[in-house]
Amino acid sequence: MNEVILRTEHLTQRFGGLCAVHDANINVRKNEIVGIIGPNGAGKSTLFNDITGMYTPTEGKVYFRDTDITGKKPYEITKLGMARTFQNIRLFPTMTVLENVMLGVHCKTKSNLLDVVLKTKRARREEEEARTIAEEILNITGLYQFRFNYATSLPYGLQRRLEFSRAMASSPEILLFDEPAAGMNEQETQDLGEFILRLKEMGYTVVLIEHDMKLVMSICEHIYVQDHGECIAYGTPEEVKANPAVIEAYLGKDE
C-alpha cells in the first residue's frame, strides 16, 4: 500500500456565517490520481486554497507527508513539493512558452536580486539550469516546438498544458489541478486524460477538481464528493456512481 503523502484532518473554512468547507478528512496516497467533484459552491476550490496556503483554515490541519503545512505561505508549500493550477488560466502573455516554464523553475533557485542584476556566476548558472529543465519539461508535455511562441498565441488546450508544464517545473511530488478540462472540447479533454495518466506513469501524484464526469470516472482511482461544504461520499468511480447520495446531489436522478 502506497504511503499517504497529503492529508487533511477535520479541515474547516468559514467566511463569516458561511461554512465553505466542514470537517474535511482527505487522504491522498503517493502516485494516485484522486478526483474531487461536486456542484458549484460545494467548497472544492476553497479546499484547494486551504491545502496550498492561499487561505488559512479556520479549523483543522493539513499535512504534506508528515509535515504540518497548515497556514504556510504558498511559496513555502511549493518548495516542499506541491504545485497547483487554477480555474482561470494564469499565464504571462508577454513571455514566451519557454519563459513561462522557466518561471516555475525559479521558485527553487537561490540567486537574489543583486545576483540577477549583476549577472553573477551563480545567477548565470541557475538561469542555464532553469532553461535546461524547462526545455526537458516542454519535450515531455509536447510543447517544445512552441517554446519561442508567446504563451497566448497557443490554442486554448495547449495554454492549459503550458500551465501544467509550469507547475511541473517546480519539481513537485504532487500536482493539484483545479478544473483542468474547463473550456476544452471533447478531443482536448481526451488528450488531457491521456496526459494525466502519463503523469502517473512518471511518478507524479495528481489531485483534480473537475466537472467533466467522463474524464473523472475514466482516470481517477478514488473520488471525494463534496456538497454544501460536506464530503458526502468517497470511493472508487464505480462506488461513487452507485451511491444514492451522489446521484441525488450531483450526478442527477434518472427520470
Image (cartoon, helix red, strand yellow):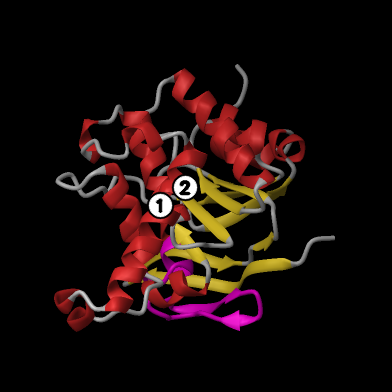
Q: Is residue 69 magenta?
A: yes
Could you tell whether 65 is left or right of 185 in the image? right
Residue 217 picture location, percent across and down: 65, 33
Residue 255: percent from left, percent from top: 60, 16
Q: Amino acid at mark 1?
A: Ala
Kind of residue sitting beneath label 2: Ile
Which residue extends farthest right?
Answer: 1
Who is closer to the viewer here, 120 or 230? 120
Verify CB contact (< 8 Å) between mark 2 and mark 1: yes
Q: In the drawing, what numbered circle is on residue 134?
A: 1
Q: Residue 188: x and y, percent? A: 45, 24
- The correct choice, above or below, for 29 with respect to 150 in the image is below
Q: What's the residue at 40%, 35% (across, down)?
A: 143
User: Which corner quadrant holds the N terminus?
Assistant: bottom right
Could you tell me which secondary element the residue under label 1 belongs to?
helix
Q: Residue at x 59, y 27 (%)?
A: 214
Residue sitting at x 52%, y 55%: 175
Disc 2 from disc 1: Cα separation:
5 Å
Label 2: which residue? 137
Q: Is residue 132 above or below residue 63?
A: above
- The boundaries of the magenta stretch are 48-73
